[in-house]
Amino acid sequence: MENGICLKGSVEKIKILKLEETPLIRFTLTVDKEEKQNCLIRAHALNFLYQVMEGNAIVIYGRKNKRNQVVVEKYHVNKN
């Protein structure tokens, strides 16, 4: 995939932006102490809400949009 990005970090600040029709979720991925990345997930957003809690470690794969947010296409929750 062109311009794809893969990041690993912990989830913070999960917020539901839209729940009707196609849900849209926003969250912050803390990659390390200095790097935080704003992320959006539309595909599988309800599954994401069910599987992921703040503080969970995840790996995401997606692409950046014009606002420099990562639009998540795939994710994997790391089991502790």
Image (spheres, rainbow, N blue to C red):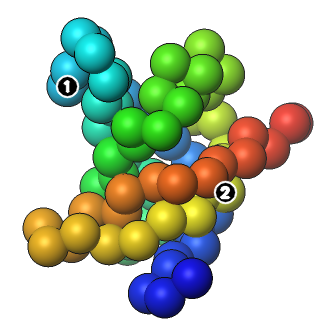
Q: Which residue has dot 1 on it?
A: 17
Q: Are marks 2 and 1 in contact (CB under 8 Å)?
A: no
Tell me if mark 2 has few (under 14), some (14-19) or many (20+) residues whose alpha carbon lies within 10 angstroms of its own: some
Residue positioned 19% across, 25% down in the render: 17
- Position in image of residue 10 (x %, y %): 57, 48
Q: Amino acid at mark 1?
A: Leu
Q: Amino acid at mark 2?
A: Val
Residue 43, placed above or below residue 63 = above
Report the residue that reaches farthest toward the bottom: 2
Residue 61, placed above or below residue 17 = below
Asked which quadrant contains residue 38, the reply is: bottom left
Camera-nearest residue between 76 and 21? 21
**Quarter of the image where the N terminus is located:** bottom right
Q: Which residue has dot 2 on it?
A: 59
Tell me if mark 1 has few (under 14), some (14-19) or many (20+) residues whose alpha carbon lies within 10 angstroms of its own: few
Q: Earlier in the sequence, mark 2 or mark 1?
A: 1
